[in-house]
Amino acid sequence: MVTNSDAYPHFWAILDRLPVALLYKESAKAEIFANAAARSLLGKTLPDKALSLPQLSEIRILDQHGNKISLLSNPLLMALGGTKLHQQVLLEVQGTPSLYMLQSDLVKLQFSLGNTIIVTLSPLQNLPEPRSAQSDTVQPVAKPSADIAQLEEALAFDKLMSLISTELINVSSEALDQHIEDALAALGEFCHADRSYIFQFNHDISEMSNTHEWVRDGVTAHKENLQQIPEQALPYFFEKIQRDHIFAVSDVSKLPAEAASEQQEFEHEDIRSVLCIAMLAGQQLIGFVGCDMVARQRNWTNNDLRRIKLVGEMIANSIQNVNYRVSLQQIQQQLLSANQELQKQANQDGLTGLANRRNFDEKLLEELQRSARSKLPLGLILLDIDLFKPYNDHYGHQAGDAALQQVATALKKEARRQGEVAARYGGEEFALVLPDSDGKACLEVAERVQQHIKALQIRHCQSDVADYLTVSMGCYSVIADKNTGPEQMLQHADKALYQAKAAGRNTIVTDD
């Protein structure tokens, strides 16, 4: 057995000429060598003859019922990681499912001192016919040594960590819960636990909730009953997990007297052994990942602690990353809303809520350009409150502001269609931009505005026109062309408004 491929310069050439499909990986290297037969079998054309785990994970693996096997249970990748497999699967090669039997005589795992793994794949149809038990003597299978078994287990767990990290990295907030559940299932199965779970603390670590849970078949789930548990309910546990970042109990019945509440809760959940490892985001304790034993007791080992801690760190990082992204999205949305509000304020008159002069000028130009394209008329009404200075002097500026707001409300009632704009043009002057409105339509709108304002019955004892507040209006309509500008429209409307005032106020004039 070659312990290091670099020690033998013709190593790759020899493997590439072998007729059997072969994958070769050294644990110190990320690349996976695929010889010519393997590349042909897997449909990979790679000049450098090297595959990555993500490339291998693209190969669809189906169970005997034709259902896709999850990434965490991918038998090809698990075999490459050192897990012994005894299952029948469908390996989809170049779009065509082919039957494979991944077990000890088909997926061969050989280990050298250099931690080299060789996985040999043989199609089922190429297998030799099974030999008769009467004619052949069955050779006993040698049991692997403890060192080999330990190595297989370590490689398998490393592969599991690679798969879990691949699943969790950059996971979306919508998919996070499902990926955490998958990781807990993989952890529980690998550690032979009966239950694995995640608890998360609130911001001041005074309360915790079971957010994710996996249970083995036949084991009772408790997630729904473990929500918002206060610190005073399990004080011994809260103190231990905050101080030591670990809570390991091999025999629940031997908990100290000060853990009476915890012992009662564990017995209620049929827990015989429990192991919880803190999850940290930076230096902040955000929760813990744990495993329970129900069917039997378990003396937790350093390997158990290390493995659960690694899974907890991956999940904690994923939760933190998702929270960061969600927070960033919320901040972006707040900034967008703030920008929209600033834009609104920049285009809106502060007192009346109508479009301000700047916004009015922009909208008038836009509608003139649209009129020139569509050959449809555009109407403009200028409105001035009659004798507003005497009103302000007599009733005060506060009453004057209230009167302006009431007039603005009346104008809003007539600016509802697409493109129609009601604006405060000056101090007591207002304007209405009316797309698709000829002179007659403008006059009808102006008359309705006059009636709205009359209905307000705003008392004006300083007016020589009426006992209530009145307005004068000038109307103008045009079918614009490329030479028609806002100044032209304003001049015509202002001329009509001047004539309305000269005619005694509380009057509407249309400039033809």
Image (spheres, helix red, strand yellow):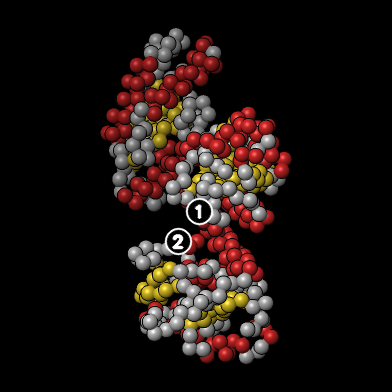
Secondary element at tag 1: helix
In this rendering, would 160 be left or right of 302?
A: left
| Residue 288 in view (yes/no) | no
x then y, percent, for residue 303? 65, 57
In depth, the one of 172 and 237 nearer the eye is: 237
Report which quarter residue 158 is drawn in.
Answer: bottom right
- Looking at the image, the residue that sits furthest to the left is 440
x then y, percent, for residue 277? 64, 47
CA neighbours of label 1 inside 10 A, class few (<14), some (14 to 19), many (20+):
many
Secondary element at tag 2: loop
Give the residue drawn at x 51%, y 26%. 351
Q: Earlier in the sequence, mark 2 or mark 1?
A: 2
Q: CA distance from mark 2 to mark 1?
A: 12 Å
Give the residue drawn at x 41%, y 74%. 100
Give the residue drawn at x 63%, y 29%. 232
| Residue 227 in view (yes/no) | yes
Give the residue drawn at x 42%, y 22%. 407
Position of residue 451 relative to residue 332, above or below, is: above
Q: Which residue is mark 1?
A: 185
**What type is the residue that disc 1 sits on?**
Ala
**What type is the residue that disc 2 sits on?**
Ser
Q: Which residue is mark 2?
A: 70
Contact check, label 2 and label 1, Cβ < 8 Å: no
In depth, the one of 322 and 246 nearer the eye is: 246
- Mark on residue 177? none
In depth, the one of 362 and 486 nearer the eye is: 362
